[in-house]
Amino acid sequence: MSLFEEHIDAIEIAAKTASWVCFIAIFVLFFTGHASTPLAIAVVIICVSNITLHQIKETRARWDEKDAEERELRREQQRENRERELRLQIQRLQRPGR
């Protein structure tokens, strides 16, 4: 598991917070007439935050897909085990000694 995946919740919170803070800063900078380098930096931070949030969404979707596959495999194995047990019970019941 990568560092990104280990700290995905904290990274998501930080990206959302940075995005909102920069969004507010853009309005403040724009309406106060300071549309310069800080405004451009705020826009870049929002873009990077959105990219990060998109990566988080993709990672979680991949995890969910993997979990669904694992659950399906477990269900299939349980079904096979039940079928095997039933066959064994049928064989025991069909033995002539009983």
Image (cartoon, rainbow, N blue to C red):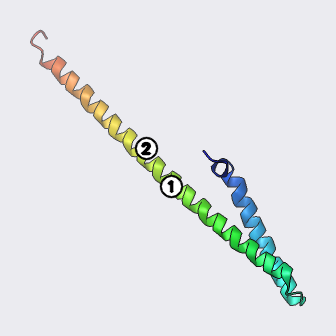
| Residue type, label 2 | Glu
Q: Which residue is mark 2?
A: 70
Q: Are marks 2 and 1 in contact (CB under 8 Å)?
A: no
Residue 11, image x, y percentages:
71, 57
Q: Closer to us: mark 2 or mark 1?
A: 1
The answer to whether residue 32 is above or below residue 41 is below
At mark 1, the secondary structure is helix
Between 3 and 8, which is closer to the camera in this rendering? 3
Residue 25 is drawn in which quadrant?
bottom right
Furthest residue toward front: 37
The answer to whether residue 84 is above or below residue 56 is above
Marker disc for residue 40: none
Q: Is 72 positioned to the left or the right of 4 in the image?
A: left
Residue 3, image x, y percentages:
67, 48
Residue 34 is drawn in which quadrant?
bottom right
Image quadrant occupied by the N terminus: top right
Q: Which residue is mark 1?
A: 62
| Residue type, label 1 | Arg
How dense is the environment of label 1, judged by Cα within 10 Å: few (below 14), some, or many (20 and up)? few
Between 91 and 52, which is closer to the camera in this rendering? 52
